[in-house]
Amino acid sequence: MATGPSSEAGAMAAGGGGPAVFLVAVNGQIESGEFPGFDELYCKFCFVYGQDWVPTAGLEEGISQITSKSAVAPTTLVWNFPIEITFKSTNPSGWPQIVVSVYGPDFFGNDVVRGYGAVHVPFTPGRHKRTIAMFVPESTSRLQKFTSWFTGRRPEFTDPKVVAQGEGREVTRVRSQGFVTISFNVVTKDMKKLGYDVSPSDMQTPCVPIAEGIHKY
């Protein structure tokens, strides 16, 4: 259950004596991926966030270049694709997640999904690195698997954002496939003034820990 700002901070904001929103600025890059058996892949990203969050700058989605494995890194696909966005919000419920989708050619040259994954933007300011375990949806029968292979139309989500929302995911058959590494630089503004603590845990700090105000969106 989401926890609201402290009463003092809320009263201050309501009275015009302090900020009414906080800011979260994110930049970094989708660094690389490891997908054994696949090459010449590109990735797409998009952000998913709660109804109280509003992007104020940057890009909510993007698509990278196609990259190939090299002799220097025979198992790694390097994109180094930049991400940059700034949000404003009144509470941390629905904290932003980045959804990554990776695509590449199949045997017939059709673009098919090679992996979906999602991770929350780190809650604490500073530099962070996250490795996402990717997955792909699977056909539910052998006939569907053969038909998908023969026609080149593999199972995929109509909207990749469903990966972050989780609704209906429990009835989707998936298979783990690959990893993607993302680096983040996170800067926050006015969170403490609204009663949220994003610093390393400190038992002496009276502010509301940020994790208590977040639920899966």
Image: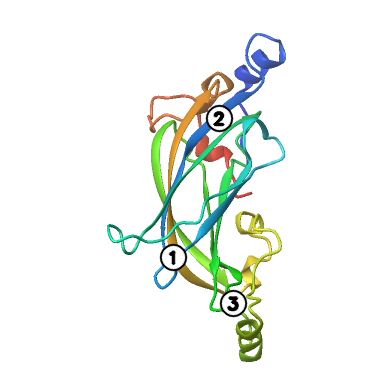
Label 1 sits on a secondary structure element that is: strand
The CA span between labels 3 and 2 is 36 Å
Mark nearest the camera among 3 and 2 is 3
* Residue at the image point whose x is 66% and y is 82% from the top: 151
Q: Which residue is mark 1?
A: 178
User: In the image, what residue type sits under mark 2?
Assistant: Val
* Numbered badge on residue 138: 3
Name which residue type carries label 3: Glu
Q: Residues within 10 Å of mark 3 (few under 14, many from 20)?
A: some
Q: Are marks 2 and 1 in contact (CB under 8 Å)?
A: no
Q: Is residue 125 left or right of residue 42?
A: left
Mark toward the start of the polypeptide (3 vs 2): 2
On screen, residue 26 above or below 190 = below
Outermost residue on the left side: it is 72
Q: Which SS class for mark 2?
A: strand
Nearer the observer, 60 or 77: 77
Residue name at image x 51 percent, y 42 percent: 121
